[in-house]
Amino acid sequence: MSIMTRRGFGGGLVAGSGLLLAGCDALVSAPRARALVQGAEQATQRWQRLVGRDALAREFSAADISPVFKANGTIAPVEPGYQAHAAANFVDWRVRVSGLVERPLSLSLAQLQALPARSQITRHDCVEGWSAIGGWAGPPLALLLNAAGVKASARYVVFLCADNYGGKADEGGLKSRTRYYESIDLVDAWHPQTILALRLNNAALDVAHGAPVRLRVERQLGYKHAKYVEEIMLVDDLASFGSGRGGYWPDRGYEWYAGI
Ligand SMILES: Nc1nc2c(c(=O)[nH]1)N[C@H]1C(S)=C(S)[C@@H](COP(=O)(O)O)O[C@H]1N2
Ligand SMILES: [Mo]
């Protein structure tokens, strides 16, 4: 792991202030019973918190990186708006930080790229039973939260994605598709390995893996790692999103806290 400070951060993220600166190859099977009882979910979360709020997920060396990192879920968003951004190499992509914050932000990709980035080589575990080791890099979420100023009433961070999932476009199922979203609590939000990844294995994120920006929340399972992030919303309650369970897959029965 390493923290590299990128040159050329010109400030201006928050109305010109410098607030942001102040502030399977190795196919490891990770089978998870889909219907884990809630007690077990809470036990995992409690155990992780006992071990340490900032305990790090294991990090690997470059030699461990999987030759192929499988892409899963949405791998090519069909939404016209997204496709226009992709065609323009995401120059106009913005990530908003909204909700219970003192200073809502709207950050361009260039601004995100100019922030200090964290690099980490970690293992991604999908509930479907595959894993892959990849090297991710991007600004810690904490930097953005500091810049925005999280209000005391905030309890969760919700990630709203550009893709709709479920149903098949060719079956006229577009209506049954719902916006992919995920959420984490503030402990994971401030965790040092929680980053907005802009790069995978030393290259800009490709569309399949969530271009131009996706969440990495390394102590949790794959479905928590929201791709195509366009809005990061601080909230005190998850009830108003989807079916109210805090994520696309949690709404369909998966654990909300998907601790590994
Ligand atoms: N926006 C969005 N994020 C998503 C998904 C998705 O379908 N849409 N799938 C999730 C699942 S189940 C997994 S395992 C990982 C896959 O990430 P990858 O495609 O980079 O392997 O993304 C997660 N994040
Ligand atoms: Mo997954």
Image: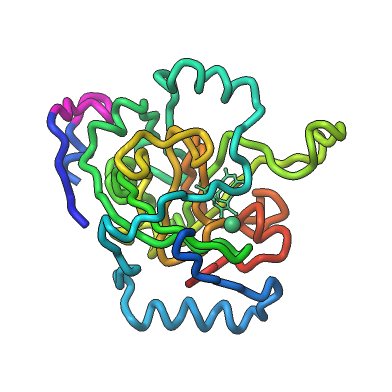
Q: Height in image: 216 above or below 30?
A: above
Q: Is residue 175 visible?
A: yes
Residue 22 horizontal/vertical position (percent)? 16, 43
In the drawing, does residue 147 fall left or right of residue 165? left
Q: Height in image: 46 above or below 155?
A: below
In the drawing, does residue 213 fall left or right of residue 60? right
The quadrant holding residue 12 is: top left
Q: Confirm whether the magenta stretch covers residue 145.
A: no
Q: Quadrant of the N terminus?
A: bottom left
Q: Residue at x 41, y 51 (%)?
A: 67
The quadrant holding residue 126 is: bottom right
Q: Residue at x 40, y 78 (%)?
A: 48
In the drawing, does residue 213 fall left or right of residue 23? right
Residue 45 horizontal/vertical position (percent)? 48, 76
In this figure, which colouring scheme has been used for the structure? rainbow
Q: Can residue 96 be seen in this view?
A: no
Near-viewer residue (140 or 203): 203
Q: In which quarter of the image is ligand 2?
A: bottom right
Residue 34 horizontal/vertical position (percent)? 69, 71
Magenta span dominant secondary structure: loop
Q: Residue at x 27, y 29 (%)?
A: 13
Residue 219 horizontal/vertical position (percent)? 42, 66
Please state the total of marks drawn on the protein image. 0
Q: Confirm whether the magenta stretch covers residue 14.
A: yes
Q: Residue furthest right?
A: 171
The residue range painted magenta reads 8-17
Q: Height in image: 242 above or below 16?
A: below
Q: Height in image: 110 above or below 236?
A: above
Q: Which residue is drawn at 35% across and 40% down?
A: 199
